[in-house]
Amino acid sequence: MKNLAFTVLSIIGLVVVTHAGTPTADVIMEKSQAAFYYAGTDMRTKVLMELVTDGGKKRTRVLSMLRKNDSKNRNQKYFLYFHEPGDIRRTAFLVWKYPERDDDRWIFIPALNMVRRVAAKDSRSSFVGSDFTYEDISGRDLSADEHTLLREEKLDASACYVIQSIPKSAMDYTKKLSWIDETTFLPRKEEYYDAQNKLARLFVAERIDIVTLGTGAKQSYPTVTKRTMKDLKSGHRTEVTFLGVDYDMGLDDGVFTERSLANPPSKWVQ
Amino acid sequence: MGSVNSKLLAVLLSSGVVTSVHAEGRAIDVHGFLLGAAALHTTGERPVGGQGGDFVLGEGRLRLDLGGRTASGKGSFSVRGDLSLDAISSDLKVDVREAHAGLSAGPMDIRLGRQIVTWGVGDLLFIADVFPKDWDSFFSGRPAEYLKHGVDGFRMTYSSDIVGIDFLTIPVFTSDTLPSSKRFTIFDPFSALGNWVEEKPGTTMGNTELALRVFRRVGGADLSFYVYRGFSRSPAVRPDSFQTRFYPRLTVAGSSGQGNLLSGVLSMEVGHYDFGAERAVDEPFIPNSQWRFLVGYQCQLWGDSTLGIQAYEEALTFRALPAVNPHPDRYRTVLTSRLTQLLRYQVWKLGLFAAYSPTDHDYFLRPEVSYKMTDSLNLSFGANLFGGTAHTTYFGQFDKSDNVFFNVRFDF
């Protein structure tokens, strides 16, 4: 039902775009979230995450990420499996995400061969010690911010919509400016401002690849394959690279269960 | 003898799978770590007849972790072993932590060999987890994974949306490793009676342990039911001419649930421990049967900080008190809390675990600080602090065994 409403909204949005010229901020943000977090029916990627301090000291995390969208609503399932570094190797997370309520989350602790539930962390908390928050990874509720289209602007030769988002309740940031690509609707740049209206965090999509499936390229998904989040106060930054992305592989629901945590399907996790 | 046989069997089976994995030209993953661990008494008191002076622990360990899968992913094996050098006793030991081979077919997973199994939802308080623990390692400051011993047996798991079934059969008995009297001051009500002998259940068909877990998600919560038929992993004493330490038969039935509640996780567990005392009229030294209850809640306080609290109760079901002085209380309550704080991009980890028993009037504190110097190198510093009004209760007996520990670990 929700998916139908979403489709209808998108069609209306498209009609509005065709006839009125410029979509509204809400429509742009919806399309952006769809392109960035909901692309395809499922997705698999191997992620290289580098945490770099001000002084250039690097820490590396390598993980496999599987995602599946629920066909009937906006629910999603995520499976994350850590390959590196050594002390978290074989640790796995399973998340069943519900936009309107707390996620169900489980962790697998390899040394004890144990699965337990974990408290749905504060979405503004850092993801495995990086500059990205859990919300940055899985998507923030669009209705939690007030969105305004400020202008259209070119960023590195790509036409972008510049959207201002102001959180409706108290957050670590008071204002966010997003540069949304007019063709792919992927965010190219995001600026997070603190309470003093100073730039606190900066997100940059360094590289966007068009991932096409099969011969004849029936379906193509523009994907941000390299992205950086920088904390301007500490000078610390996190660089995330997708080492290979696949979509629409027909991931079974069985992949997103407790069984996979202890025994990850080697077909998808290497 | 039984443990050597099962080690051999596990290693043979694993090498069979290793060979087949290797024959398919697939690489075998080799990982491991180098661990230096030391722990020192802080009280200045040393156990009677102890060794090592003020040292509770001083060792170097090399862990080798071999694992692999077949090309289809259906077969797998894992061998995890330690080579340890105990600086106090100058012992060089090989400790096979795990050695198993496994197969997955449809909804079934089977695993044969030595494997670590953890059940239940408690944090250092165990009801449904009837598997062997190594309290000596834990109270000596070895990393938390050393709390569990592997079991030698066969595990079969069936997974489906309707129900999950986890079944284990364990032919070889492994007891808990309790803190050694050589390194800890422990309360032994029979110490005045002289030397003792140990009587472990032999490896026979009748002594094979069976453990079953049936689980399913019900209304958003993870629900499990457990049944275990086997032996108690800590000994009871029969003060006959040999002061025999024996392991009474044990049957456990229990249940646990874990689910979300107000942005946190609520855990509940209940179990009945039947040591067969009612049936063995001529064994007054078998522990009384008991009920165990546990309620726990875990939530996030602020960024990168977690709090977990638990309330635990043991209730003896009486026929008569065992002839031990002092008598065990009918009810024993333990309250625990665990606070964890990660700092600076999760490079620093501060933790505090506290347990207090209002019925035993004793406590246990374990503060710990961890620093990840690099992705491979980790330093930890902590303490095990015990106290109590009596020196006969579970934590109180270790009052003079307070220690501080230090670990250095290099992962590869």
Image: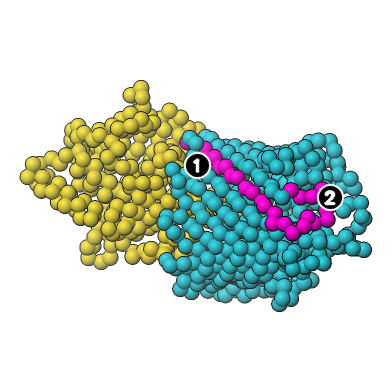
Chain colours: A yellow, B cyan
Q: What residue is drawn where x is 33% and y is 29%?
A: A174
Instruction: Answer above or below: position of B229 versus A70.
Output: below
- Residue B131 in the magenta stretch? The answer is no
Disc 1 element: strand
Residue A270 visible here: no
Q: Does residue B160 appear to the left or right of A203 in the view shown? A: right
The residue carrying pointer 2 sits among few (fewer than 14), some (14 to 19) or many (20 or more) residues within 10 Å by Cα, namely few
Element class at badge 2: loop
Task: Identify the image quadrant of residue A201.
Answer: top left
Residue B215 in picture, x, y percent from top left: 50, 63
Which region is colored magenta? B303-329
Nearer to us in this view, A225 or B342: B342
Would you name the residue on which mark 2 appears?
B325
Q: Are marks 2 and 1 on the same chain?
A: yes
Single out the residue that lies furthest toward the left.
Answer: A19
User: What's the mark number on residue A238?
Assistant: none
Percent position of residue A28, x then y: 21, 42
Say which amino acid is labelled 1: Cys
* Relative to B380, A105 lies left or right: left
| Mark 1 chain | B
Q: Is residue B325 magenta?
A: yes
Which amino acid, by three-letter code, is at mark 2?
Asn
* Residue at (16% x, 52% y) in the render: A8
The quadrant of the image that shows the N terminus of chain B is: bottom right
Report x, y in % for residue B54. Answer: 83, 40
The label on residue B299 is 1
